Structure formats: C-alpha cells, structure tokens
Image: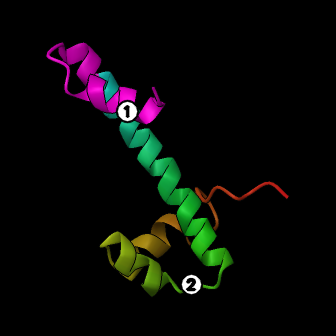
Amino acid sequence: MSEGVRLAQEASSRDPAIGLRAVRALRELADRLEALQVGNARDQGWSWQEIAVCLGVSKQAVHKKYGSGRRILRKEP
C-alpha cells in the first residue's frame, strides 16, 4: 500500500490521534509537492501569474511564498 493511500485511510480513522497525525502528514506532503511543482513551473519559464491561477491563489501570494527561492525544492543535478 502506498504511503498516500495509508495516510488517506488513517485520516478517516475514528481515533483522533491517528486521524490528526495523518492530516498533519498529508498537509506536509502537499506543501512539499506544491514547492516541487512551483520550482518545476519556474524552471520551465512559467510566470507567477500562471502558477497562481493553477493554485487558485493570487500572484502576490505565490510570489511571497516562493519568490525569493526559499521553500522551492530543486531537482538534484
């Protein structure tokens, strides 16, 4: 079973401790994936506006979060 499937199952647990830990792990995973894809988009020449539209946020919000290069996970050479 993949980690994502396991976390999704645990997030719906009746045990709040299990469910809340899974929710936290899913949030952290989503944050890492977002940073990875923002970096991917920027590497391919996407504008902050194009990225913002896909994420459903303002251009200013995405630029503030990732604009200085922090929090973007770069691919290893």
- Labels 2 & 1 near each other (Cβ < 8 A): no
The residue sitting at 30% across, 73% down in the picture is: 56
Q: In which quadrant is the C terminus drawn?
A: bottom right
Label 2 vs label 1, nearer the camera: 1
**Type of amino acid at the residue the image marks with label 2:** Trp
In the displayed structure image, the side of residue 12 where residue 36 appears, left or right: right
Residue holding disc 2: 46
| Count of residue discs | 2
The residue range painted magenta reads: 1-20
SS at badge 2: loop
Considering the whole magenta stretch, tell me its main secondary structure: helix
The quadrant of the image that shows the N terminus is: top left
At numbered mark 1, what does the secondary structure look like: helix, strand or loop? helix
Spot occupied by residue 33 in the image (x, y as percentages of width and height): 50, 53
Alpha-carbon distance for marks 2 and 1? 31 Å
Q: Report whether 33 appears left or right of 69.
A: left
- The disc labelled 1 sits on which kind of residue? Val
